[in-house]
Image: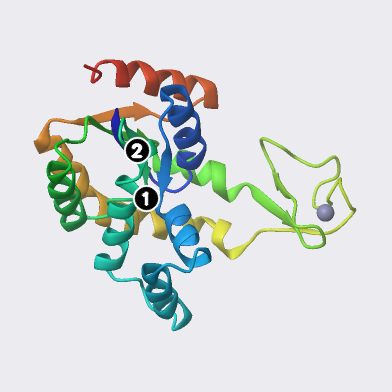
Amino acid sequence: MRVVLVGPPGAGKGTQAQFIASHLSIPKISTGDIFRANVSGGTELGKLAKEYMDRGDLVPDEVTVAMVRDRLAEDDAQEGFLLDGFPRNVPQAEVLKKMLAEFGTALDVVLNLVVEDDEVVRRLAGRRTCRSCGKVWHVLFDPPAVEGVCDACGGELFQRDDDREETIRRRLEVYQEQTSPLISFYADEGILQGVDATGPVEEITQRAMSALRRFAD
Ligand SMILES: [Zn+2]
């Protein structure tokens, strides 16, 4: 199966990507992994991407697309793949569609992990990080024995700026703005499938798997 996974920050996308890909015995292809592989492997595209990143610039779409194309052409991706982090926008989605058509194939399904903003805030804003050892605790889901103190090393816990409610809400707004055209694009293509991403991790995976069965040939 050829699957794209999308979802807001805090939806547990990385974890679900791994579980779903392993259930389907297909490679999980994330843009982060592709970047790292190209940069550490010293490919021409990796060198080019590194120049942009070293300058603090965004890597242009053409470079990302070329890396994705190379990765999708590899042997292990011929029977299917799960893409995580690509496409990010409609132009990239159109390029992906063309690219797959050249390979004589097409996407089967786009899974959209659906979580309410308030739930994402509850998950992320409760995180507390240890200043000394970096371990992450959660005030509701994984609290330390003594409030504000790391059980592992006795260090002081603090809330990272990234985990503040205002920051999280802003990231969610940006995500919605950038992603809603992409979601509409795939809805129009008739391959969009929403998955309720609340509750235990295993239940979310089960929901995703039964949703996928409807798209399997
Ligand atoms: Zn600690």
Residue 215: x and y in percent read 23, 20
**Residue 59 in the image: above or below residue 3:** below
x, y percent for residue 118: 45, 42
Residue lying at 48% horizontally and 28% vertically, measured from the top left: 22
Does the Cβ of the disc 2 residue fall within 8 Å of ligand 1? no
Lateral position of residue 105 relative to residue 159, left or right:
left
What amino acid is found at the position of numbered circle 2 in the picture? Ala
User: Mark 1 or mark 2, which has the lower sequence index?
Assistant: 2
* Residue 38 drawn above or below residue 12: below
- Farthest-out residue, front: 75
Q: Say whether residue 50 is visible.
A: yes
Q: Quadrant of residue 211?
A: top left
* Residue at image location 11% in from the left, 36% down from the top: 189
Task: Point out the frontmost of discs 1 and 2.
Answer: 2
Name the residue carrying label 1: 85
Above or below for 22 versus 155: above
Q: Which residue is drawn at 33% across and 59% down?
A: 67
- Viewport quadrant of the N terminus: top left
Q: Please tell me whether residue 176 is drawn above or below residue 104 in the rendered image.
A: below
16 or 166, which is in the foreground? 16
